[in-house]
Image: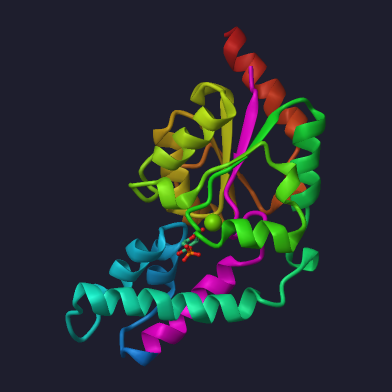
Amino acid sequence: PLRAVIFDLDGVIADTAVVHRSAWEKLAQEIDAPFDEVLAERMKGVDRRGSLEILLERAPRAYTEAEKDELGERKNRYYREQIGSFGPGNLLPGARHAVEATRNAGLRVGLASASRNAPLLLERLGIADLFDYIVDASTIERSKPDPEIFLAAAAGLGVAPAACLGVEDAAAGIASIRAAGMVAVGVGHREALGEADVVLPGLTAFRIGEFVEDQDRATAE
Ligand code: BG6
Ligand code: MG
């Protein structure tokens, strides 16, 4: 049976996918690197350095490791400037309710965010206490699409991966959930979430009861 739900943060719970994106776009302009939809979609869910490497694939020149550190820090400054004024109003519609409904159904709730800003953001959104386990992104070695982060969340919750459901807005995240052996729920548009088992337009459409029943049925078969 289903015992836990592990949520991604940016673009699933917090309205921050657009903030990351605009910070990267600003950096791209400064270094004359092309930036488009396809690139932005590929960068989604990927950690800071991984995203930077994707951006630099088509940059007009090569960068040293020290320069890359500076570029990553610069992007983070742009991002932090934007989320500085964030509060509970920056939760995505249905997010708080989806997390609370999951808890009320007796399931454990985890967070698998690649962002080092996740703890700060959770405090600002006022939902830090709703999670039983939050993966510390700085302890993860391999970025999504690798399953490491979702497996670490399941381990932290003390739940077998097969009894977990993961929720993501990025293709890299869906791939990570699937590779971890969990049911993958995508939030957003089907085209961007290829391998998702289920796609919802947003968390307002999240019904924990349906997922519990589906899993019970699958286990009985
Ligand atoms: C992910 C975002 O949650 O966190 C990515 O989807 C971001 O866009 C990544 O690059 C890392 O975030 P941060 O805050 O550590 O730079
Ligand atoms: Mg995300």
Ligand 2 falls in which quarter? bottom right
Q: Magenta stretch: give its range.
A: 1-29
Looking at the image, is 78 positioned above or below residue 176? below
Q: x, y (%) of residue 77?
A: 50, 79
Residue located at (41% from left, 58% from top): 46
Residue located at (60% from left, 54% from top): 9
Side (left or right) of 211 relative to 169: right
Looking at the image, is 211 positioned above or below residue 65? above
Residue located at (39% from left, 89% from top): 29
Q: How many marks?
A: 0
Q: Hey, which quadrant is residue 88 in on the image? A: bottom right
Residue located at (41% from left, 43% from top): 175
Q: Quadrant of the N terminus?
A: top right
Q: Does residue 24 show up?
A: no
Q: x, y (%) of residue 33?
A: 31, 84
Residue closest to the eye, 122 or 19:
122
Q: Does residue 107 show up?
A: yes
Side (left or right) of 48 relative to 20: left
Q: x, y (%) of residue 40?
A: 43, 70
Q: x, y (%) of residue 122?
A: 68, 57
Q: Quadrant of the C terminus?
A: top right
Side (left or right) of 198 relative to 179: right
* Colouring style: rainbow
Is 24 contained in the magenta span?
yes
